[in-house]
Image: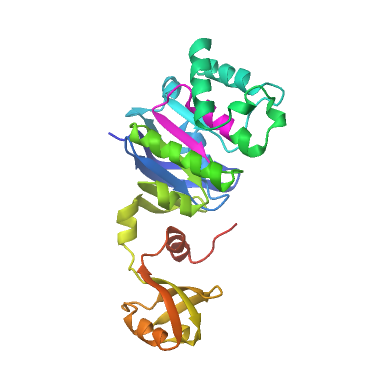
Amino acid sequence: MPIVELQKVRKVYDTKVAVNDISFNIEPGTMFGLLGPNGSGKTSTIRMMIGITVPDAGSISLFGQPFTRKNLHRVGYLPEERGLYKKMKVMDQLIFLGQLHGLDAATASKRSYEWCERLGIMASIGKKTEELSKGMQQKIQFISTLLHEPELIIMDEPFSGLDPVNASILQDTLVDLRGQGRTILFSTHRMDQIEKLCDAISLIHNGNLVLSGGMREIKSRYPNNRVQMTFEGDASFLEHPSVETAKNYSGRAEIKLRDGDDGQALLAVAVGKARISRFEVIEPTLEEIFIETVGGNVDA
């Protein structure tokens, strides 16, 4: 039974169709990516899932039941817009937010200390929020989302404002939570994060669902016709007839082969012109699949 089920969900603001008849399921214990460019309809979809807004058409089910607010205690939600109290100290704030989720003060305090230690922010627990960096504030709000140990974790752009080290810490935490059987949905426009973390995805563009399904199943629809290549010397082999497109970043080439080509002819020509240290035929990235699907019309 799906944890989340959307059936032909639609949302219109004035004359703008924000979400256009979107349907998808999220299975228990999986990490699900809702992705697309900024303004594509991701946040509007999430807000309907948890009752912040109501769909104009279609249906939403959580935990196998039509949406009701009583089930929200089983959900942890990290919104895209951050909502911490600037003048409150970190630990006071976490305990307060834990109590809002139904925890008693002692349990909220214990779990807050454990999470602060795990995410490496113990040195900041006595500081006011306004004294902290955006990345540190993001980690605090991340913790507040998890204190009541929700079954379904929904995170809207959770890695925004984080440096690579802290983004990696949060990614590892999400993987651990999935391993504990939690169901996780996170939205992002960063397709490399989705590709690395998610079991299944729905990809939205201009309010429309353009791709949906298991990550491996989606990837299997597309040929392994990309080449990543590192070389020194003459780059004229990139003009070979087997090459549809090529980008050369100072000796690191990203190549798309023509349909039906396996790259062997290109490799044979390349070794005669340059010193090749890497030549790998790979599947297309999720970003390449998306661009191909929407015709290259991807907004920032």
Q: Position of residue 257 (x, y in %)?
A: 39, 77
Whether residue 208 is visible, yes or no, is: no
Q: Relative to 14, does residue 208 appear above or below in the rendering? A: below
- Looking at the figure, which quarter contains the N terminus? top left
Q: Which residues are magenta?
A: 139-156
Whether residue 285 is visible, yes or no, is: yes
Q: Position of residue 101 (x, y in %)?
A: 50, 18
**Residue at left offset 59%, top offset 46%:** 163
**Residue 153: within the magenta?**
yes
Observer-nearest residue: 249 or 21?
A: 249
Q: Relative to 203, does residue 1 appear above or below in the rendering? A: above
- Looking at the figure, which quarter contains the C terminus? bottom right
**Residue at left offset 56%, top offset 35%:** 79
Q: How is the image coloured?
A: rainbow
Q: Position of residue 283 (x, y in %)?
A: 36, 65
Observer-nearest residue: 62 or 161?
A: 161
Q: Quadrant of residue 132?
A: top right
**Number of labelled discs?**
0
Q: Quadrant of residue 129?
A: top right
Left or right relative to 60: residue 56: right
**Residue 159: within the magenta?**
no
Q: Position of residue 84 (x, y in %)?
A: 64, 27
Q: Relative to 190, does residue 141 appear above or below in the rendering? A: above
